[in-house]
Image (cartoon, rainbow, N blue to C red):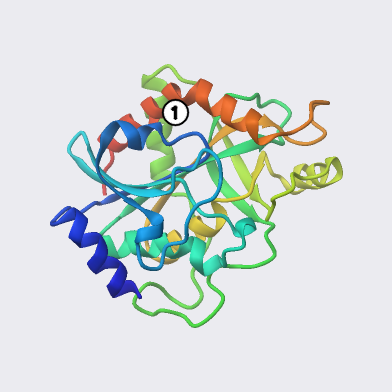
Amino acid sequence: MMKDTLDYIETYTDSFKPEIGIVLGSGLGVLADEFCEYAIPYEKIPGFAKSTIEGHKGQLVFATIGNQKVVMMQGRNHFYEGHSMQEITYPIKVMKKLGVKVIIITNAAGAVNKSFRPGDLMVITDHINNMGTNPLIGVNDDDLGTRFPDMSEIYNKNMIKLVDAIARDLKMDIKHGIYMASTGPSYETPAEIRAARFMGADATGMSTVPEAIVANYCGMKVIGISCISNFASGVSTKKLSHNEVIQTTNKVREKFKNLVINLVEKMYF
């Protein structure tokens, strides 16, 4: 399957060799629209599943930002859509095979930390896998990674320092925090959010963790950035909806875009 995938992508991209990968979460696809050179819908790519969620265009985008060659997932697939863990993380393995060395994984997340507000950006320092499974379950591919990968520094500390430095240059306040992923598609209950806070989570969502696990396993440097799109259940009295997520990410997309563009331009390997 991997050979079929790579052969098909090459018919679109010719000799384009990306070294940076970006996964664009809910409402954050504007970056891909602005810099797109080649775009391939997921449903056309062997091994890729079609995205069904509003705010996720569902295509693989190749672009040049500054002097950097970049491949972007404009939208992702989720476990709650009925895809397997292997299906939702297959594009990460493809990125590795394409030559990606650093991956930026973004998402929209609910604030568990009561000091966070919708519209904040949070760099992920660690995560909690509350999804009840792991994308590495199954036969190991020794060409991609070891059977038992170390997880003590999934989110690269030097890259976090780079994000912080860029945020300072942009006079942008950026939070640090731990992201907890649950399966969804229902939002968490107030009791579950209290439990998440007790475990140390600052934000919660339904993605990112499987992709980060696989990227780390494949030897890529990982950067995680959450757009805090809403208060998690019980933090405020407001009912939760996906429309609020899209509205908030639309409001802060210029801030997010500027951060990521500067990060890509200053990236080192």
Question: Left or right: where does residue 174 sit relative to residue 143?
Answer: right
- The residue at the point 25 percent across, 51 percent down is 19
Residue at far left of view: 15
Q: Mark 1 packing: few (<14 Cα in 10 Å), some, or many (20+)?
A: many
Amino acid type of the residue that numbered disc 1 sits on in the rendered structure = Phe
Q: Residue at x 42, y 62 (%)?
A: 48
At horizontal 44% and vertical 60% (from top left) the residue drawn is 216
- Could you say which is closer to the camera, residue 80 or residue 151? 80
Residue 96: image location, x then y, percent: 32, 62
Return the x and y of residue 97 as percentages of the image width and height: 29, 65
Secondary element at tag 1? helix
Quadrant where the N terminus is found in the figure? bottom left
Above or below — where is 3 with respect to 221?
below
Residue at the extreme front: 44
Picture layout, residue 61 above or below residue 237? below
Measured along the vertical axis of the image, is residue 267 above or below residue 173? below
Percent position (x, y) of residue 197?
76, 42
Could you tell me residue 15's position as x and y percent?
13, 56
Q: Which residue is mark 1?
A: 256
Left or right: 72, with 80 as reference point: left
Please state the total of marks drawn on the protein image: 1
Q: Nearer the viewer, residue 9 or 236?
A: 9
Q: Quadrant of residue 134?
A: bottom right
